[in-house]
């Protein structure tokens, strides 16, 4: 679906057409300025393939925000969002926690000029609305479309939840 490519584009301004499956988890960091604060984002990439599924669970705890990514050209990747959403909540959240911040990215909007797209933006936005108005971004790691904006949103959400935790 392009999780690693999105991270590479955001953290290093690079894109590779070569596919290399993530085994277990990997992470990248990037420093950004938000208001008067210098923030270091540590972005974890967990394996999306089912056979590596259980390896990512240990990395969920301690997260400040969860980014769910699907390929707008592959219906099954969108259908799997619901499973990943529930998996994350079940593994990362305490029973007393009512909500957790998410951001959803519909990736590969550039593919074939958009002609191979099978999931509409409206369908994705409706799904996000049904889960408590999760922020949604249409992205292309290859074209660097909306990548910066999406991760800025992630950083802002993580910061706001940190402030909330400090005052809770």
Image (cartoon, grey):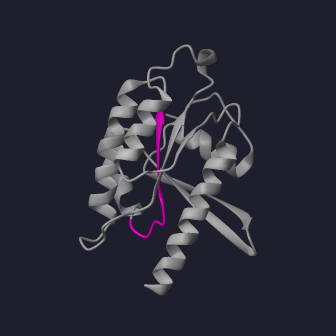
* Residue 167 covered by magenta stretch: no
Q: Is residue 37 left or right of residue 48?
A: right
* Residue 69 covered by magenta stretch: yes
Give residue 139's quadrant in the image.
top right
Along the line of sight, the residue nearer the viewer: 39 or 34: 34
Counting from the top left corner in percent of width and height, residue 135 is at 51, 50
State which quarter of the image contains the C terminus.
bottom left
Looking at the image, residue 140 lies above or below residue 67: above
Counting from the top left corner in percent of width and height, residue 45 is at 50, 51
Q: Is residue 4 left or right of residue 91?
A: right
Along the line of sight, the residue nearer the viewer: 7 or 107: 107
Looking at the image, residue 144 lies above or below residue 63: above
Residue at 41% over, 31% down: 123
**Looking at the image, which residue sits at the far left?**
95
Residue at 46% over, 66% down: 63
Q: Which residues are magenta?
A: 61-71
Residue at 41% over, 62% down: 59
Counting from the top left corner in percent of width and height, residue 156 is at 60, 63
């Amino acid at each position: 679906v392009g999780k690693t490519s999105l991270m590479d584009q955001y953290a290093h301004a690079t894109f590779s057409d070569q596919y290399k499956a993530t085994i277990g988890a990997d992470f990248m960091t990037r420093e950004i300025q938000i208001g008067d604060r210098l923030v270091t984002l540590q972005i974890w990439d967990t394996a999306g393939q089912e056979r590596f599924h259980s390896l990512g669970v240990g990395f969920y705890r301690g997260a400040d925000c969860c980014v769910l990514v699907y390929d707008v050209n592959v219906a099954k990747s969108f259908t799997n969002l619901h499973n990943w959403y529930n998996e994350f909540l079940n593994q990362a959240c305490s029973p007393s926690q009512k909500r957790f911040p998410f951001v959803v990215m519909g990736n590969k909007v550039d593919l074939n000029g958009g002609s191979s797209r099978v999931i509409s933006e409206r369908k994705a936005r409706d799904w996000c609305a049904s889960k408590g108005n999760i922020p949604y971004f249409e992205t292309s790691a290859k074209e660097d479309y909306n990548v910066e904006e999406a991760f800025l949103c992630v950083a802002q959400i993580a910061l706001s939840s940190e402030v909330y935790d400090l005052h809770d």
